[in-house]
């Protein structure tokens, strides 16, 4: 793993309360899972940053090993890996996602 790539990943996670490493961008997702994840985050008044792994092959190659999560999208809230589309959907349905977002933005 490239130290430059790891530093970039860590910087994005540290400097953004919600980061979605995804295929495409929030305005134009390039896979159904990325689209579904962005759709859920749009239901809340909190900003999130999408990082296009298709345009960043170094991140695409490094992030699964870094996070120990094999698939995309990968969602980080408040510096912690939450998971992918299925987990974000489950958290949304249970009300936990809203709690995580409130905690992240009210600190």
Image: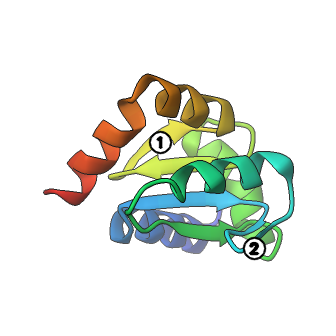
Q: Nearer the viewer, residue 59 or 54?
A: 54
Question: Which quadrant of the view contains residue 98?
Answer: top left
Q: Is residue 87 left or right of residue 102?
A: right
Question: Which quadrant of the view contains residue 84?
Answer: top right
Q: Earlier in the sequence, mark 1 or mark 2?
A: 2
Q: Is 3 drawn above or below residue 98 in the view shown?
A: below
**From the image, which quarter does the N terminus lie in?**
bottom right
Q: Residue at x 54, y 59 (%)?
A: 42
Where is residue 40 shown, x and y percent of the image? 58, 48
Q: CA distance from mark 1 to mark 2?
A: 19 Å
Where is residue 72 shown, x and y percent of the image? 73, 47
Which residue is the extreme one toward the left?
107
Q: Residue at x 25, y 49 (%)?
A: 102
Helix, strand or loop for disc 1: strand
Q: Is 74 drawn above or below residue 106 in the view shown?
A: above
Q: Label 2, on which residue?
A: 56
Helix, strand or loop for disc 2: loop
Mark 2: give few (<14), some (14-19) or many (20+) Cα within 10 Å. Answer: few
**From the image, which quarter does the C terminus lie in?**
bottom left
Which residue is the extreme one toward the front?
43
Q: Is 38 drawn above or below residue 67 in the view shown?
A: below
User: What colouring style does the render use?
Assistant: rainbow
The circle on residue 81 is 1
Q: Is residue 59 left or right of residue 103?
A: right
Where is residue 67 shown, x and y percent of the image? 56, 43
Q: Residue at x 64, y 54 (%)?
A: 39
Q: Residue at x 83, y 68 (%)?
A: 54
Mark 1: give few (<14), some (14-19) or many (20+) Cα within 10 Å. Answer: some
The circle on residue 19 is none
Q: Nearer the viewer, residue 31 or 44?
A: 44
């Amino acid at each position: 793993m490239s130290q430059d790539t790891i530093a970039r990943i860590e910087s994005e996670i540290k400097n953004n309360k919600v980061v979605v490493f995804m295929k495409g961008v929030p305005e134009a997702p390039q896979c159904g899972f990325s689209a579904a994840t962005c759709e859920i985050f749009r239901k809340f008044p909190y900003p999130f940053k999408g990082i296009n792994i298709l345009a960043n092959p170094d991140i695409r190659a490094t992030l699964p090993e870094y996070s120990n999560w094999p698939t995309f999208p990968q969602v980080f809230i408040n510096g912690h890996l939450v998971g992918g589309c299925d987990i974000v959907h489950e958290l949304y349905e249970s009300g936990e996602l809203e709690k995580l977002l409130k905690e992240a933005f009210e600190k």
